[in-house]
Amino acid sequence: MYFEDRAEAGRRLAENLAMLREADVVVLGLPRGGVPVAFEVARWLDAPLDVIVVRKLGVPHQPELAFGAIGEDGARVINADVVAGAGVTGEEIAHVERRERTELERRATRFRAGRSRIPLTGRTAVIVDDGVATGATARAACQVARTQGAARVVLAVPVASRQALHLLRREVDEVVCLEQPMFFYAVGQWYHHFDQTSDDEVVELLTRAAARTAPPQPVPAADPRLRDDEVCVRAGKVDLAGHLTIPAHPIGVVVFAHGSGSGRHSPRNRYVAEVLQRAGLGTLLFDLLTPAEEIDRANVFDIDLLAGRLVEVTTWLTGQQHVEGLPVGYFGASTGAAAALCAAADPRVHVRAVVSRGGRPDLADGALSAVRAPTLLIVGGHDHLVMDLNREAAKEMSCETVLAEVPGATHLFEEPGTLSKAAELARDWFTSRLPMAEPAGSA
């Protein structure tokens, strides 16, 4: 199959995406050549169109070898194996990331012409390009879409090499590809007209799509939040970055402990935090580890280190404006759940409720019997190993402990509707177990 041009390829591709017509979809074109294809897909699906701007992070002495990728809003993917194998230092990582983020922001600003990025949290991201040769850029885009909160990622391309598709299927929920030729040399060989797409054309197509799908603009309401700030907390010898949000009339505050160390950029944590905020709960999403520490996987399993930092951050938090006097809860994921349970057992802090999502409470070891805070253990129904570990851990706990299964969910709660179910369970647990308190600062 040959395509006349990118527009025709987009129309043919759209015909094969009928199953997404009623879904909550955002179509994301890879600039520049993927945008004309994505424009046709978005028009057929009656969905919003955006670009997904990514920059690969190359090893300094071998830039064609990527050790990670970055996207907007702080999205960041690091391949620890490449970092270790290439001997890339933390300073080099920071230097490359600063340089590439500057270029990323320049391109995003140019393409969108002042519009904001369309949020992906909880939605289906359809990533579209005009074709896939090696798959490196498409892979980075899929990973970044996931970190930006997409509940489902679909890669849709008119043509691709078989080898690249084989690798990409591991990164996405679904691949839609019209042609997978046996002999693949270049994307352009499958088009009669394959002129270079200009920046101006990308801007024009995005502007046309935005005008077509833009909803009526409501009158802006006053921001009900008391605080919505980036914060920096000193813990031992390191500074930990975080984001503190306190809604109006808060009934409590929940501190998030993420297993990989980086909590404030976790799309799943951010989604859960939004659900809690709407229920009147403040949230603190922060990084238990610095970027340099996160590269060493041993730190992710150093529960004593993570729990100690969680205690220090909690002590700092309870003295903050609009927080003092509010009951505190912990929300932990993966090894962060073990850290949360250990910290909850620490006499230096007073924690009123704990929720673990896909957590490893077994790693809290001897601290389990000392936890007094009501604890909810949320596990995916298809996460069989973690389910067994949670059952055994629950037997060691003497506090109120409930094991809640989310049917159909695997470890990362990537299946449609499973993360929202987990968030609802967490919301109901915190709002019923955290005692009601007078809003901080009230008379």
Image (cartoon, rainbow, N blue to C red):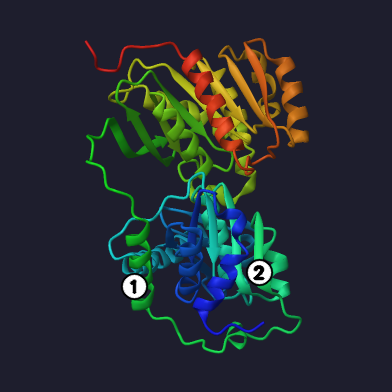
Query: 307 or 125: nearer the eye?
Result: 125
Res 349 visible: no
Q: Is residue 289 above or below residue 99?
A: above
Query: 367 or 77: nearer the eye?
Result: 77
The image's mark for residue 177 is 2
**Residue 161 in picture, x, y percent from top left:** 69, 76
Q: Is residue 35 above or below residue 50?
A: below
Q: Is residue 198 above or below residue 140?
A: below
**Residue 431 in picture, x, y percent from top left:** 47, 18
Amino acid on which the number 2 mark rests in the picture: Cys
Q: Circle 1: is it few (<14), some (14-19), or many (20+) Cα within 10 Å?
A: some
**Residue 331 in picture, x, y percent from top left:** 53, 28
Amino acid on which the number 1 mark rests in the picture: Glu
Image quarter for residue 21? bottom right
Q: Circle 2: is it few (<14), some (14-19), or many (20+) Cα within 10 Å?
A: some
Q: Which residue is mark 1?
A: 204
| Label 2 SS | strand
